[in-house]
Image (cartoon, rainbow, N blue to C red):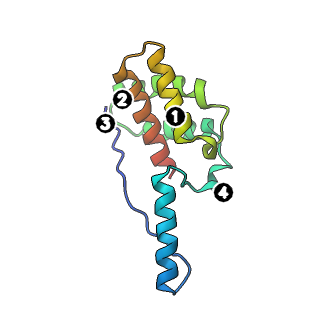
Amino acid sequence: MYCGCVFQQYRRSTATVDRKLAEKIYTKVMTMVAKGKWFEFDTASRYSFDELIERYIEYSKLNPHKRTFKNILTYMKQLLSEFSVYTLNQITPELISRYRDKRLLEGKAPQKVLHDLNFLNCAFNMAI
């Protein structure tokens, strides 16, 4: 399933005219991104996972393929059962890895788990 998600680079001001300081800030942010710890925490702490899914469903209704939307509803139910107690800033790569491992140990097909994770990825990309 292709959800149309595209990774893109966002530019933001470092609020400084000092080039060396700006480069240090950039390096620090890129390190945090690589470790999976970069997200707009101020904004992310205000929204629950449930709210993210609701918004993604509204966004997905614009998708012309009914089958794709039906699949999204299926993935959403499974992810909500696991992540609905969290705010967006509490969902970490480690938490997602544990979810993946749990689903595989339950005997779910790797492709099914991959679809779940792709849906989650698309929802977070939309949130960003």
Verify CB contact (< 8 Å) between mark 3 and mark 4. Answer: no
- Up the image or down, 80 lies above or below 93; here it is above
Earlier along the polypeptide chain: callout 4 or callout 2? 4
Residue type for callout 2: Thr
- Up the image or down, 45 lies above or below 65; here it is below
Which residue is under mark 2? 68
Residue type for callout 1: Ile
Please rate how many residues cluster around mark 1, counting C-alpha atoms within 10 Å: few if below 14, some from 14 to 19, many from 20: some
**Residue 39, horizontal then vertical, whole percent:** 55, 54
- Identify which residue is drawn at 38% across, 28% down: 115
Residue at the far bottom in the pictured view: 17
Quadrant in which the N terminus appears = top left
Q: Secondary structure at mark 2?
A: helix
Which residue is under mark 3? 2
| Residue depth check, mark 1 versus mark 2: number of the one nearer the observer | 1
Which residue is under mark 1? 96
Earlier along the polypeptide chain: callout 1 or callout 4? 4
Give the camera-side residue of 93 and 111. Answer: 93
Which residue is under mark 4? 42
C-alpha separation, residue under disc 1 versus residue under disc 3: 20 Å
Q: Secondary structure at mark 1?
A: helix
